[in-house]
Image: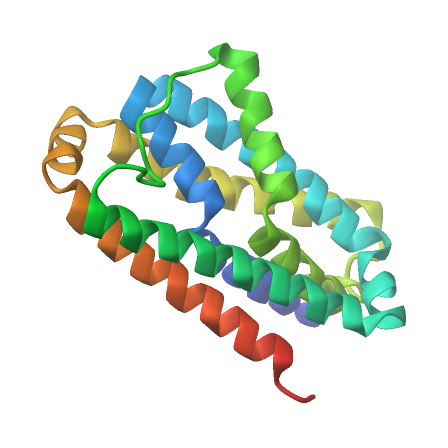
Amino acid sequence: MTETVLTLLAAWGALAAAAISPGPNMVAVASRGLGSGRRAALTVTLGIALGGFFWAMLTAYGLGLLFEAYPMLLRALGLCGGAYLAWLGFKGWRSALRGGGSEIAPKASGGFWGDLGYGLIVTATNPKVALLWASLSTFVAGVTETIWITLIFAGVSALVLILIYGTYGLVFSASRMRILYERFTRTADALFGSAFGLLGLGMIIRSVRPV
């Protein structure tokens, strides 16, 4: 039991660290917060958390077996995810230098179901998220052997995502934050562009490094 608890805590810690760092999920929540306020941002967050719940269930049931059988898929996923984040970094710096085309830009709400679906789609197609869950799959597969432990793992994972992205949503939907972002858009683009670029480069390096 102790090993199970420690393994799950380590997995949730890795999930929290990945969620805190910039990526498409954060962009989706921040953009809705800037453009449509707290409710829309939190609804997108709920969609991301639901997506995280299903990713966690998939992780517990067989995703690790796929990557054990075809380890090159994990490398390919890392390269694709790294390239995508590097592209976001390039766009951020281009926007900082030229103005316009910011990755984090105010976006209108699509209503409750539209925002919920948007959060689900973003996290389902996010290569950074896919690589994270693929990496965790072989790590937690040995301890998620019962349906109850699997449900606890998935439920707490969703809660971690709600807490982190919900905080992003509240921050970016605050009126003062919106004013500051409008005033310092180019600076923010440079900062986020640097973060995206460094994360992407790190993912690419880890993917091409010999085992």
How many discs mark residues in the rendered view?
A: 0
The single residue placed furthest to the right in the displayed view is 69
In the depicted view, which residue is nearer to us: 111 or 13?
Answer: 111
| 98 on left or right of 153 | left
Does residue 68 sit above or below 84 in this rendering? below
Measuring 46% from the left and 71% from the top, which residue is drawn there? 201
Q: How is the image coloured?
A: rainbow
Q: Residue at x 11, y 36 (%)?
A: 180
Residue 41 appears anywhere in the view: yes
In the rendered view, does 40 fall on the left or right side of 47?
A: left
Residue 1 makes an appearance in the image:
no
**Is the residue 166 above or below the residue 8 in the image?**
above
The residue closer to the viewer here, 162 or 103, is 103
Q: Where is residue 5 drawn, in percent x and y? A: 64, 63
Which corner quadrant holds the C terminus? Answer: bottom right
Residue 21's quadrant in the figure? bottom left
Residue 99 place in picture, x, y as percent: 21, 41
Where residue 191 sits: x, y (%)?
24, 56
Residue 167 horizontal/vertical position (percent):
34, 38
